[in-house]
Image (cartoon, grey):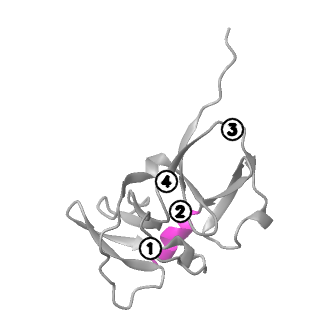
Amino acid sequence: MKPRQSARLHTLELPLQNIPLLIPSAVVAEVINPPLLAAVPFGQPWLRGVIGWRTLAVPVVSFETLIGVEAPERGSESKIVIFYPMSGRRDWEFYGLLVASEPRPQALDGSQTAAGQAELPDTPYIAAGIKLGDKVLAIPDLEAMKKAFYPA
């Protein structure tokens, strides 16, 4: 009898300025080169603009600005990660997250250790963190983000 192998979780590491995010691959629809962003008058500071994607208007968010950190300027390697709609939202309500460069796949097998609260930014938009080698990755709290994006 073979020993049971632990399940692997396929994730993406999203490079940001201060701390990278770690998200399940299943929440991502596509990664694209950033087109010109259309401004949103009177929008929240974290709303960088709107893009046209597959016949939809998709809002693009800066996670750094959302957590109170100054967002870097968009660079030549920047990407937009298009997320599937959040739970309870309409099937066309995609949103994008501006990241510094191409996301990197990470397969988690349960051997990773949890990051301590002192290693993570103090914000309600980060649920937890893990360590991959000597790198700390933050796991965003998608429910808290949903409350910010869609206030009642």
Say whether disc 1 or disc 2 marks the residue closer to the N-terminus. 1
Say whether disc 3 or disc 2 marks the residue closer to the N-terminus. 3
- Residue 152 appears in view: no
Q: Which residue is mark 2?
A: 142
Give the x, y percent position of residue 19.
64, 64
Q: Which residue is mark 4?
A: 103
Q: Residue at the spot x=44%, y=73% of the render?
A: 74
As measured in the structure, the alpha-carbon distance from the residue carrying label 4 to the one carrying label 2 is 18 Å
Say whether disc 4 or disc 2 marks the residue closer to the N-terminus. 4
Query: In the picture, which quadrant includes the N terminus?
Result: top right
Label 1 SS: loop
Q: Residue at the spot x=70%, y=54% of the render?
A: 135
Q: Which residue is mark 1?
A: 74
Sort mark 1 into few (<14), some (14-19) or many (20+) by Cα contacts within 10 Å: few
Q: Which residues are magenta?
A: 141-152
Considering depth in this image, is 113 or 142 the residue closer to the camera? 113
Sort mark 3 into few (<14), some (14-19) or many (20+) by Cα contacts within 10 Å: few
Residue 110: mark? 3
Give the x, y percent position of residue 24.
52, 49
Apparent side of residue 80 relative to residue 8 in the rendered image (left or right): left
Sort mark 2 into few (<14), some (14-19) or many (20+) by Cα contacts within 10 Å: some
Amino acid type assigned to the residue bearing label 3 in the image:
Gly
CB within 8 Å, label 1 to label 2: no
As measured in the structure, the alpha-carbon distance from the residue carrying label 1 to the one carrying label 2 is 23 Å
Say whether disc 4 or disc 1 marks the residue closer to the N-terminus. 1
Amino acid type assigned to the residue bearing label 4 in the image:
Pro
As measured in the structure, the alpha-carbon distance from the residue carrying label 3 to the one carrying label 2 is 21 Å
Amino acid type assigned to the residue bearing label 1 in the image:
Arg
Establish if 42 lies above or below 75. Answer: below
Q: Residue at the spot x=32%, y=62% of the render?
A: 90
Foreground label between 1 and 3: 1
CB within 8 Å, label 4 to label 1: no
